[in-house]
Image (cartoon, rainbow, N blue to C red):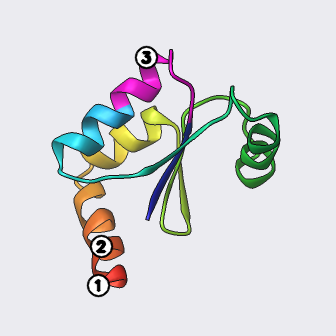
Amino acid sequence: MITIYATRFCSYCDAARRLLASKGYRWEEIDVVADAERRREMIARSGRRTVPQIWIGDRHVGGFDDLAALEAAGELDPLLQAESESKA
């Protein structure tokens, strides 16, 4: 499962959504503006206050820059594929 803690009006959140959608993946999105408890959860899990914060399975990827770095290094597809296979 892919989980993204995000807000609606965040260009980095939009970029992460576009990248994952371009690869045909879906994700659970948690709006941290609408739910303060979920924002606290995000901070506790990631140690970061900025959005997006992205998890692929149990692995905390980080924000969009981290996701894009995985893509540039050729590591994102294998990570996504492994997560998909673990759910099959």
- Identify which amino acid the numbered label 2 is placed on: Ser
Residue at horizontal 45 percent and vertical 41 percent from the top: 66
Drawn side of residue 68 relative to residue 47, left or right: left
- Identify which amino acid the numbered label 1 is placed on: Ala
Looking at the image, which is closer to me, 22 or 70?
A: 22
Q: Are marks 2 and 1 in contact (CB under 8 Å)?
A: yes
Kindly state the secondary structure of the residue where label 2 is placed.
helix
Residue at horizontal 40 percent and vertical 43 percent from the top: 67
| Residue 78 lies in quadrant | bottom left
Kindly state the secondary structure of the residue where label 1 is placed.
loop
Kindly state the secondary structure of the residue where label 3 is placed.
helix
Whether 78 is drawn above or below 6: the answer is: below
- Looking at the rendering, the stretch of residues picked out in magenta corresponds to 6-15
Looking at the image, which is closer to me, 15 or 61?
A: 15
**Is the C terminus in the top left, top right, bottom left or bottom right quadrant?**
bottom left
Q: Are marks 1 and 3 in contact (CB under 8 Å)?
A: no
